[in-house]
């Protein structure tokens, strides 16, 4: 889900996130919220494509947040006045009771939403005419982030993304067909050499004399060629089998993802050597490590680039460097396995995140009350 996020930074930070229908999915304020905590809060609900502020000159934290999330920064031509912000929020959400930080954040988000409202209408009308309403989120995201210049471009690029994996599969199938043809030719050549060998041996037997040196030499060469071709044939068969297995695994992964699941990529730990094993095909996966180790800045950057949805671990401790990612111990999440492919259902990940948030709120409340008693 794409989000338009309003931020009011300060000692107490206000956050307001709207979906692309203008409905609030996050409204909260909290003291001492660092950028990692803000990002974690937002990403629990969706992907920020717009970061908005209520002042003309965006604060440093807002700029950094925009850069980190690769979102688009939106700010008004002048600072919004207090009364103006209260009016905007009341007109949009008349039944909500908000503090000043939440009001400022919501005013910024609503201001940004209204800025793109004309675009939303155009996209809705165009997609309805084409019968492609399900592509609304993607089209809007690409246009706002500058990945597409028009609705037509956004739809075209989306189609290219859909067919990209299919092209890979077709390419693998073409290679498999090429290997099959090569195996057939090698097999025919072996049969031909065997027949020639048989004729030479028969000729030597009929003469009942010792075969001439040239015949023996010819036989040796042909036998050698047969052995070489057999080795080549075996290698080609092994390569064909590996390719066939890869295609089957790829098709099975596609099925699992289409069923509403998230694939799992396994690593030993978060060391430089292990992180280098991750590739583009691991994007949007869950990472499962045997041991949770302290990652380098480069490793964090790669995990962020691949949009890793969560990190599951067997042993180890959580590090501050991983605060922007959702971390869960393997014993606390239901991991499924099909044909040696590990995956977690999207519903299960949502449930775990929700439980973690509830627990976090309970602990925070407990600490707060305990602080009052000790005062």
Image (cartoon, grey):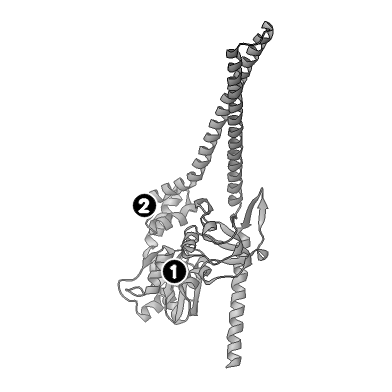
Residue 347, position as x, y percentages in the image: 62, 60
Say which residue appears at 61% left-offset and 78% top-offset.
362
178 sits to left or right of 66: right
Task: Between residue 170 and residue 158, name the one nearer to us.
Answer: 170
Residue 51, position as x, y percentages in the image: 41, 68
From the viewer's perspective, is residue 10 above or below residue 241?
below
Mark 2: few, some, or many residues within 10 Å (few <14, many ≥20)?
Answer: some
Residue 150 shows which numbered tag? 2
Res. 156 in view: yes
Q: How far is mark 1 from mark 2, CA to CA?
A: 23 Å
Res. 110 in view: no
Residue 209, position as x, y percentages in the image: 67, 8
Task: Classify residue 140 by image quadrant.
Answer: bottom left
Task: Between residue 333 and residue 85, name the one nearer to us.
Answer: 333
Say which residue appears at 59% left-offset and 44% top-offset.
251
Task: Between residue 56 and residue 208, name the one nearer to us.
Answer: 208
């Amino acid at each position: 889900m794409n989000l338009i996020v309003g931020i009011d930074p300060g000692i107490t930070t206000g956050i307001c996130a709207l979906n692309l229908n203008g409905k609030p999915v996050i409204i909260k304020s909290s003291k001492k919220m660092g950028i990692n905590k803000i990002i974690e809060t937002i990403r629990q609900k969706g992907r920020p494509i717009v970061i908005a502020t209520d002042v003309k000159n965006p604060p440093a934290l807002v700029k950094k947040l925009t850069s980190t999330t690769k979102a688009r920064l939106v700010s008004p031509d002048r600072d919004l006045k207090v009364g103006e912000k209260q009016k905007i929020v009341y007109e949009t959400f008349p039944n909500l009771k908000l503090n000043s930080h939440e009001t400022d954040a919501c005013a910024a988000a609503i201001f940004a939403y209204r800025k793109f409202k004309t675009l939303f209408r155009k996209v809705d009308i165009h997609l309805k005419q084409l019968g492609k309403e399900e592509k609304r989120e993607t089209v809007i995201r690409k246009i706002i982030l500058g990945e597409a210049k028009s609705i037509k471009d956004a739809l075209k690029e989306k189609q290219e993304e859909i067919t990209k994996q299919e092209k890979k599969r077709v390419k693998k199938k073409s290679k498999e067909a090429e290997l099959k043809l090569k195996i057939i030719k090698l097999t025919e050549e072996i049969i031909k050499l065997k027949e020639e060998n048989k004729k030479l041996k028969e000729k030597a037997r009929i003469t009942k004399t010792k075969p001439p040196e040239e015949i023996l030499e010819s036989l040796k060469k042909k036998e050698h060629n047969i052995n070489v071709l057999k080795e080549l044939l075996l290698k080609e068969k092994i390569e064909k089998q590996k390719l066939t297995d890869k295609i089957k695994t790829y098709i099975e992964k596609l099925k699992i993802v289409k069923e509403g699941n998230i694939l799992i990529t396994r690593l030993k730990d978060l060391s430089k050597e292990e992180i280098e094993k991750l590739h583009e095909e691991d994007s949007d996966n869950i990472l499962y490590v045997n041991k949770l180790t302290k990652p380098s800045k480069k490793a964090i950057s790669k995990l962020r680039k691949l949009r890793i949805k969560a990190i599951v671990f067997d042993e180890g401790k959580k590090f501050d460097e991983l605060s922007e990612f959702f971390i869960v111990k393997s014993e606390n999440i239901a991991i499924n396995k099909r044909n040696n492919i590990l995956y977690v259902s999207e519903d299960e990940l949502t449930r775990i995140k929700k439980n973690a948030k509830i627990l976090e709120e309970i602990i925070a409340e407990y600490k707060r009350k305990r602080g009052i008693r000790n005062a």
